[in-house]
């Protein structure tokens, strides 16, 4: 049950070579569990999500790996079969629902379309009832059904997307930065809504974002991506209190704290361009703890029995 | 810039067609006398052959001369109308957009109303009363009276956008005069856009002129391409089977229109990314 | 209400256009060198066998627009007539009224123009959308360059080519006219077929030459729409390709396309007039040509004004379709 991703690879073929946007990413999300996926812009988080939905566009291609939900490998099935799996098995909640809803259709029409296209053959009244229930689940009244997207606030639109995402009871939900375009109050409402619905349906949730603070309050486990690679994954308490990868350590250290005053920390150096990744460990140019091996040996996620894995050579040195 | 052109096949093809056409006409002048383009200069209704490689029409015009001079005359109308129209339109656009306020509002409404009225109909009204004294130059001027509308509208909106650009605001802060800003700051960025508008204006002017001529309101003696078609239609070229008289002016006009069309498409491609960069 | 405000603005625009057009018709002949209208009427009096009739026209004209009258009263008399739909009489066909001439020719023009424009719009838009849709067969994309180039050619040149190929060389279709020379108008199927036969080439000229316009513009809209977030989300929701194409793609891309239709009506109208000319099709274009040849000024001005008004009405209607299709324009407010 849940989602099992193994060795996911995404390559972009462009003039002058190929770029590995996602490099051998593997992770599991159990039913009812919440996994946070963090990383800087361009680290491959959204690309991973798109790959899982079979929504990559040329010149990007999924180059290998498996993503299994309930015995079905999402990466191996035909596009037609994938269309059926979307929203049923795996559902996607977009970033910034500002423009994600069709501007010329009412909310009800869009929710109905979704059900009809997935073979829900109920009469219209029944469909409407399901829509009302779904909206109630996200704290929106039935009158929203008759509204057009531009008549709703950003927070309301995002909640509508959450409602749509839950309509067919998916096993896995991917929420791609669902709150980054919202004000703090709406953020809280949406996250609470999302959490409640996810718990109620016992779905597996992958929350993509770059706000570790938000993650800390919400997810059970955290996965950190850097330059297309998964560098650390473990339970939230473990990763936050005993981060094993220097990048994670630096990220956590740079979170401003309420009590400490002083200068804001950052991470020295810049994220490497995917066209010119450093050999060996992608992070080594910026790593204070690097040594000889890091310059030419690409580290892989280790086999920690406690479930806290890191892709770093330091573990052997320690 | 050469690299950009290579990636722009429309522009190249268009340029080739137009330049080819002009070259044909200019070189052709050497081989064809102006008088040959008028009636009774050759035996009538002769198919293309030997001495008259383009044949002759029912009035005895040497069609080679007609095509050569007709192309030049038609282009002349287009260029006069296009350049005048663009000039007037640009001037008005700058005045309105730069001044802003009520002047701009009045101009916007006026141009919108005037644009609703089709060119051909206005030309018909005007040309029908001065038909006797019309020649290619006056046709060009009359068309210019209508050709300024679209450039005025387009350039006005461009200038309005540019007025808010950083480099313009900076120039204003530096105390540069309006004239200086317009000619030294804005114009260079507008050039590709103006180029595209000029080609479109010429193209539409030619279209308007042949429409006018087809209705019989053209210059009655000068053998423009449109006039040639008018004579061809009204002197039973189809019935008499004078296919060369039918095909030749149409073919030249098609080359002209397609060439101008491709040129416009090409210039649009050049104009747009440039302007976007100019904003940053 | 928002729509009311939009309608009011468009109505004002319409009134402005009609006013400008009629003023144009009033002032141009009076600004011209010589006195073309008077001259024509005088010439007609001398020429016509029915000189008595035309003289009464001249008398009536002078009563309202005589040179002795001040310009303002002439203008007001003229405007009064216009508002009462009185476009005067034909000089060469006196006592036929200008409005009669127009109304006889109108059905032919509307039939031709209306049907071909709608057909071209429909086909061209669909083709343009399919040419950039990812799921569609590649042949659609391939047809675009040809259609584009064809759209550069004026309608009536196309007409001439078609006449040459199909009427002169192949002789499959008639050379022109609206019906056979020997045909008597009747409600029979045979007559209807004759009309159809005569309409094929004129309709084809307009169709072939204008389809490219819609194709090209729809392509651009469709590409923009395909890049929008709601298209990506629609795919993520697992909606069928057909629904995404029609209800998410077409539906959104068609909004600016309809505005373009409204703006292009003038171009299409002018082109159709010339097409009628080429084919001797008994529509308004043909009447205009006759009037020009005969220097029948009242008919010329009447036709021009009528066409401009028709155009303005059509644009008004097309503008009002926008709020109907786009809820964002309809409202303009939102609930928090």
Image (cartoon, rainbow, N blue to C red):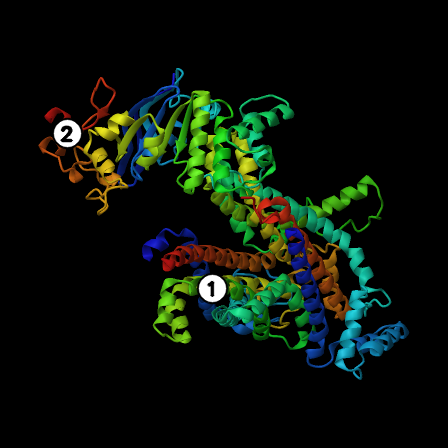
The residue sitting at 54% across, 63% down in the picture is: B150
Above-or-below relation of C114 to C46: above
Q: Is residue B51 visible?
A: no
Who's the residue at 81% across and 65% down the image? C84
Q: Image point 45% across, 68% down: which residue? A: B26
Q: Which residue is mark 1?
A: B160
Q: Which residue is the extreme one toward the front? A: A259
State the SS at label 2. Answer: loop
Residue C150 point in image, percent of width and height = 55, 50
Question: Measured from the top left, where is residue C113 in percent x and y?
Answer: 69, 51
Q: Which mark is residue A165?
A: none
Tag shown at residue A297 = 2
Asked if residue C269 shows in the view, the reply is yes
Quadrant of the rendered image containing residue C160: bottom right
As displayed, is residue C70 above or below residue C262?
A: below
Q: Residue furthest bottom?
A: C68
Nearer to the camera, C197 or A3? A3
Q: Residues under labels 2 and 1: Cα distance?
A: 57 Å
In this rendering, position of residue B149 left or right of residue C68: left
Task: Name the chain letter of the residue that bears numbered label 1.
Answer: B
Between B205 and A137, the one lying in front of the other is A137
Viewer-side residue, A205 vs B196: A205
The residue marked by circle 2 belongs to what chain? Answer: A
Mark 1 lies on a secondary structure that is: helix
Judging depth in this view, the residue of C45 and C8 nearest the camera is C8
Q: Is residue C262 above or below residue B57?
A: above
């Amino acid at each position: 049950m849940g989602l099992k991703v193994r060795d996911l690879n995404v390559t972009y073929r462009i003039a002058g070579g190929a770029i590995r946007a996602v490099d051998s990413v593997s992770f599991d999300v159990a039913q009812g569990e919440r996994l946070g996926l963090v990383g800087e812009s361009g680290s491959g988080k959204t690309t991973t999500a798109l790959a899982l939905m079979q929504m990559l566009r040329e010149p990007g291609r999924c180059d290998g790996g498996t993503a299994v939900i309930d015995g079905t490998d999402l990466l191996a099935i035909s596009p037609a079969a994938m269309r059926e799996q979307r929203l049923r098995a795996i559902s996607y909640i977009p970033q910034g629902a500002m423009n994600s809803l069709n501007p010329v259709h009412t909310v009800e029409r869009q929710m109905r379309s979704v059900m009809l296209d997935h073979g829900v053959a109920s009469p219209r009244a029944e469909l409407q009832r399901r829509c009302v229930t779904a909206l109630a689940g996200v704290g929106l009244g039935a009158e929203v059904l008759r509204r057009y997207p531009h008549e709703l606030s950003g927070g309301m639109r995002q909640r509508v997307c959450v409602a749509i995402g839950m309509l067919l009871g998916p096993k896995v939900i991917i929420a791609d930065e669902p709150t980054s375009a919202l004000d703090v109050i709406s953020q809280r409402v949406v996250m609470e809504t999302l959490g409640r619905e996810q718990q109620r349906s016992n779905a597996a949730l992958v929350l993509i974002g770059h706000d570790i603070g938000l993650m800390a309050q919400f997810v059970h486990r955290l996965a950190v991506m850097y330059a297309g690679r998964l560098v650390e994954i473990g339970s939230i308490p473990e990763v936050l209190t005993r981060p094993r990868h220097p990048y994670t350590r630096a990220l956590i250290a740079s979170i401003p704290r309420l009590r400490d005053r002083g200068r804001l920390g950052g991470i020295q150096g810049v994220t490497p361009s995917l066209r010119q990744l450093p050999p060996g460990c992608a992070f080594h140019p910026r790593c204070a703890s690097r040594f000889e091996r890091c310059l030419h040996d690409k580290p892989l996620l280790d086999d920690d029995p406690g479930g806290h894995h890191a892709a770093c050579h330091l573990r052997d040195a320690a | 810039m050469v690299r950009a052109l290579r990636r722009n096949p429309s522009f190249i093809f268009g340029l080739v067609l137009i330049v080819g056409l002009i070259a044909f006409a200019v070189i052709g002048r050497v081989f064809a006398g102006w008088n040959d383009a008028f009636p009774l200069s050759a035996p009538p209704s002769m198919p293309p052959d030997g001495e008259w490689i383009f044949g002759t029409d029912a009035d005895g015009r040497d069609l080679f001369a007609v095509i050569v001079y007709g192309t030049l005359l038609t282009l002349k109308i287009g260029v006069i109308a296009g350049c005048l129209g663009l000039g007037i339109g640009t001037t008005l656009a700058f005045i309105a957009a730069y001044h802003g306020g009520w002047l701009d509002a009045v101009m916007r409404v006026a141009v919108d109303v005037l644009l609703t009225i089709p060119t051909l109909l206005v030309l018909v009204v005007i040309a029908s009363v001065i038909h006797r004294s019309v020649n290619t130059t006056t046709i060009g001027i009359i068309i210019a009276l209508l050709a300024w509308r679209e450039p005025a509208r387009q350039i006005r909106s461009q200038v309005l956008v540019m007025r808010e650009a950083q480099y313009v605001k900076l120039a204003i802060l530096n105390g540069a005069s309006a004239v200086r800003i317009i000619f030294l700051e804005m114009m260079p960025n507008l050039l590709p856009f103006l180029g595209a508008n000029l080609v479109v204006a010429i193209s539409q002017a030619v279209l308007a002129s042949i429409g006018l001529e087809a209705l019989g309101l053209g210059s009655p003696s000068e053998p423009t391409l449109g006039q040639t078609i008018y004579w061809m239609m009204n002197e039973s070229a189809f019935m008499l089977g004078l296919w060369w008289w039918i095909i030749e002016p149409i073919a030249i006009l098609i080359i002209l229109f397609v060439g101008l069309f491709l040129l416009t498409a090409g210039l649009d491609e050049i104009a747009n990314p440039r302007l976007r960069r100019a904003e940053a | 209400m928002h729509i009311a405000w939009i309608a009011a603005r468009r109505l004002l625009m319409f009134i402005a256009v009609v006013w400008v057009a009629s003023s144009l018709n009033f002032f141009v002949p009076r600004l011209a060198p010589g006195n073309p209208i008077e001259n024509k009427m005088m010439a007609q009096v001398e020429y016509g066998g029915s000189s008595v009739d035309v003289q009464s026209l001249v008398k009536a004209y002078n009563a309202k627009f005589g040179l002795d009258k001040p310009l303002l009263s002439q203008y007001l008399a003229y405007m009064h007539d216009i508002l009462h739909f009185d476009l005067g009489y034909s000089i060469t066909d006196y006592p036929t009224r200008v409005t009669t001439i127009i109304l006889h020719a109108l059905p032919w023009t509307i039939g031709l123009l209306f049907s071909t424009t709608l057909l071209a719009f429909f086909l061209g838009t669909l083709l343009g959308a399919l040419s950039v849709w990812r799921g569609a067969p590649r042949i659609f994309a391939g047809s675009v360059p040809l259609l584009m180039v064809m759209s550069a050619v004026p309608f009536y040149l196309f007409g001439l080519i078609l006449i040459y190929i199909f009427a002169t060389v192949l002789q499959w279709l008639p050379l022109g006219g609206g019906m056979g020379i020997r045909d008597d108008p009747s409600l029979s199927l045979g007559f209807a077929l004759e009309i159809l036969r005569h309409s094929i080439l004129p309709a084809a000229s307009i169709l072939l030459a204008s389809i490219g316009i819609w194709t090209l513009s729809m392509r651009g809209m469709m590409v923009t729409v395909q890049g929008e977030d709601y298209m990506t989300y629609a795919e993520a929701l697992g909606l069928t390709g057909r629904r995404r194409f029609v209800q998410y793609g077409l539906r959104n891309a068609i909004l600016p396309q309809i505005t373009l239709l409204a703006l292009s009506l003038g171009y299409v109208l002018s082109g159709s007039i010339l097409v009628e000319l080429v084919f001797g099709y008994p529509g308004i274009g043909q009447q205009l040509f006759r009037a020009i040849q005969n220097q029948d000024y009242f008919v010329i001005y009447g036709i021009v004004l009528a066409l401009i008004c028709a155009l303005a009405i059509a644009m008004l209607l097309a503008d009002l379709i926008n709020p109907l299709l786009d809820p964002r324009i309809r409202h303009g407010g939102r609930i928090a």
